Image (cartoon, rainbow, N blue to C red):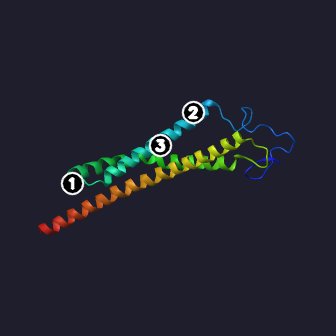
Amino acid sequence: QTCQLRKGIPLYVKSKPPKLYNKKNFIFRSNKDSEKMALQWMILTYVVAAEAAIAILLTLPSPKAIKSRFVSLISLTLQPSLFIIPFAGFQLLDIYWKNEHRLMCTGEICTAAERDRYEKSIYKAQRNAILCVAACLLYWCIYRVCKYYKEIQSVEEVEKRLKDE
């Protein structure tokens, strides 16, 4: 009955295990660190919501003049908003690192509250991973829709020139 890291390295082998979730243990961060992490996930959530709204607006049917202006506006903002890809990637790496170094309870050591806390952290990590993947996927979708629309416009212009000749 040992509490161990995911890699299988025992943390203790004594008869009385330490409490897993006390403030003296290395699992907890200071309040400022946890607030920063919450802020990062909140920012990522807002970015994903904005990307989803933009993707919906790009795919809705609309008059050609409005659609072309909207696509050109979104195309101008695509390059500056590319920061979301490395940001989401680093967040995924952080989730992976925490998952590899998360304490696991084996045997009858953990209380029900500790198990609930462990499961809650797993669910939170899964939710955050889905959020990171959604941010990257939505960015790619917006990029492709804008690119397809520009290609369609150029083909229409070529077709118009050929008809005029």
Label 2: which residue? 35
The crowd level at tag 2 (other Cα within 10 Å; few <14, some 14-19, many 20+) is few
Q: Residue at x 63, y 47 (%)?
A: 122
Element type where label 3 sits in the image: helix
Nearest the viewer among 33 and 23 is: 23
Residue 3, percent from left and from top: 78, 46
Tell me which corner region of the image, top left, top right, bottom left or bottom right, holds residue 61.
bottom left
Q: Earlier in the sequence, mark 1 or mark 3?
A: 3
Q: Earlier in the sequence, mark 2 or mark 3?
A: 2
Tell me which corner region of the image, top left, top right, bottom left or bottom right, holds residue 21.
top right
Label 1: which residue? 64
Nearest the viewer among 113 and 25 is: 113
Residue 104, percent from left and from top: 73, 47
Residue 90 can be seen, yes or no: no
Amino acid type at circle 1 is Lys
The crowd level at tag 3 (other Cα within 10 Å; few <14, some 14-19, many 20+) is some
Are the residues at dot 1 and dot 3 in contact (C-beta closer than 8 Å)? no
Residue 47 can be seen, yes or no: yes
Are the residues at dot 2 and dot 3 in contact (C-beta closer than 8 Å)? no
Residue 22, percent from left and from top: 73, 34
Residue extending farthest front: 112
Residue 37, percent from left and from top: 57, 38
Q: Residue at x 32, y 55 (%)?
A: 59
Compared to 22, does 149 lie above or below? below
The crowd level at tag 1 (other Cα within 10 Å; few <14, some 14-19, many 20+) is few
Amino acid type at circle 2 is Glu
Label 3: which residue? 45
Q: CA distance from mark 1 to mark 3?
A: 31 Å
In the figure, is residue 67 to the left or right of 131?
left
Amino acid type at circle 3 is Thr
